[in-house]
Amino acid sequence: MSRRFGAARLGREALMVLVACAFIFPFYVFFTVSMKTQAEVASNPLGLPTTLNLDNFATAWDRGDLGEAYLNSIIVVALSVLILVGFGSMAAYTLARRLSRLSTVAYLVFLVGLMIPLQLGMVPLYQFMNSANLLGTWTALILFEAGHQLPFTIFLYAGFIRALPREYEEAARVDGAGPVTMFRRIVFPLLRPITGTVVILTGITTWNDFLTPLLYVGGSSQQTLPVAIYAFRGEFATDWGVLFAGMAIAIIPLLIVYFFLQKYFIIGFASGIKG
């Protein structure tokens, strides 16, 4: 029995090591290529770099004007996430607590938004942004990202709110608190775990979005990081070291944010599934 248990456990651990290697390998290729010269990438793409060529990062930063693109991405992500957290939490609270036919229908309408392919709205949305003179501005991106991810945000918040006890709200109502005060002082602080999940998921999606910024702000001074990095790709030749260095610069904020919010991300998802 002990041998069989030992062999089974060893097999599971070996399998987990292989899975971990499968996940780590792309990061290994990603960071090693970013520190190689073009000649070294062509001759030894998977090997370790002979020298740490950090010039790729400086070249990517200067050539792509990544400082301005960084600022554009931060503004778009921050304002989009702020709108999603504010409107999404309030809308989800109303839909989750008011048990009426109207609120049920409204919630189902938002859920339908999760099933509609984004590609169906690309042409009419582009025409709307063009007619409203919003092309080449942050406003177009913020409106799109907030509207596109609002159904998913409401879905996450509503599932979490349904799992919250009503006693706190009833006690605040007895003390004379109105709906706005009750939500701001009682309910919203309890939504901290799922808010962390919303911030991470919507922030990453907005930060990594490429197609929408390419359509709305491509070629302008308002372009975001993915569009700026895409310019490193040449028609006939591509400096892969500089391209990968630019992508490495772009993912650093995501790693930092996830490192500080991972606790809320896990708690929020677990609570939402339980609810």
Image: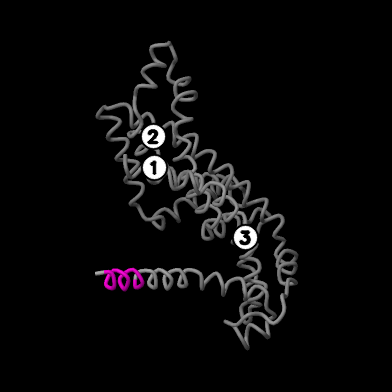
Q: Is residue 86 left or right of residue 170?
A: right
Pick the residue in front: 53 or 270: 270
Which three-letter amino acid code belongs to the residue tagged 3?
Ala
What percent of the width, then of the height, locates residue 61? Answer: 72, 64
Real-space Cα distance between discs 1 and 2? 8 Å
Splitting the image into 4 quarters, where does residue 194 fall?
top left
Sooner in the amino-acid sequence: mark 1 or mark 2: 2
Instruction: Name the residue at 32% across, 70% down.
Output: 6
**What residue is shown with label 1?**
156
Which three-letter amino acid code belongs to the residue tagged 1?
Leu
Callout 3: SS = helix
Callout 2: SS = helix
**What residue is shown with label 2?**
92
Q: Given contact means CB atoms under 8 Å apart, are the residues at marks 1 and 2 in contact? A: yes
Sooner in the amino-acid sequence: mark 2 or mark 3: 2
Instruction: Name the residue at 48% across, 43% down.
Output: 264
What percent of the width, then of the height, locates residue 18? Answer: 42, 73
Pick the residue in front: 181 or 143: 181
Real-space Cα distance between discs 2 and 3? 32 Å
Q: Is residue 169 magenta?
A: no
